[in-house]
Image: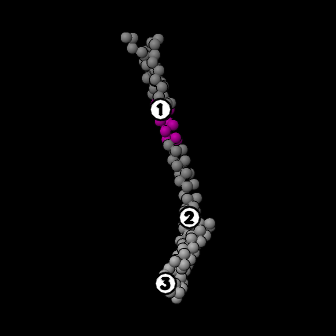
Amino acid sequence: MGFFKGILFGAGLGTLGGLLLAPRKGEETREKLITNTRELVELTDELNDNLAAFRESLVTLKGTFDTLVPAFKSGVEKDVEDFRFQAEPRIQQIQAQLEKINQSLPVTEEKTVLKKGRFTLERPTDGD
């Protein structure tokens, strides 16, 4: 609110300075003062209307945000859970296949263990 008071105060000082320094007749100066004051009031009213519209837009945006974000979040959480549900059996199948592969490899004393995330693969080390 201090900003708008500053604008009005500055406009008032500018008008007063214009009156004191203007080389016009008194009647012309009064007419100019009345015209400038009316324009200032119109601009102030327009600014207040725009600020009110902006506030309403912010309230609408917040309401939309409060409605959409929880729905979006729950949708993403559901998608992640669906992915886990679908991926878990596949991961188990891959791990079972890796076990079969590991069992079919010849047993050597030296093994190289490769671990990538959830998967582990043991291979014999080359005897070079």
Q: How is the image coloured?
A: one colour
Please tell me whether mark 2 sits on a helix, a strand or a loop.
Answer: helix
Q: Nearer the viewer, mark 3 or mark 1?
A: 3
**View extreme (bottom): residue:** 27
Type of amino acid under label 1: Gln
Please tell me whether mark 3 sits on a helix, a strand or a loop.
Answer: loop
Please tell me whether mark 1 sits on a helix, a strand or a loop.
Answer: helix
Q: Nearer the viewer, mark 1 or mark 2?
A: 2
Main SS of residues in magenta: helix
Q: Which residue is mark 3?
A: 24
Front position in the image: 66 or 14: 14
Is there CB contact under 8 Å for labels 3 and 2?
no
* Percent position of residue 62, x then y: 57, 61
Front position in the image: 11 or 79: 11
* Percent position of residue 5, x then y: 61, 70
Label 3: few (<14), some (14–19) or many (≥20) C-alpha neighbours in 10 Å: few
Relative to 127, is 7 above or below?
A: below
Q: What range of the chain is rendered magenta?
A: 84-94
Front position in the image: 89 or 27: 27
Relative to 57, is 126 above or below?
A: above
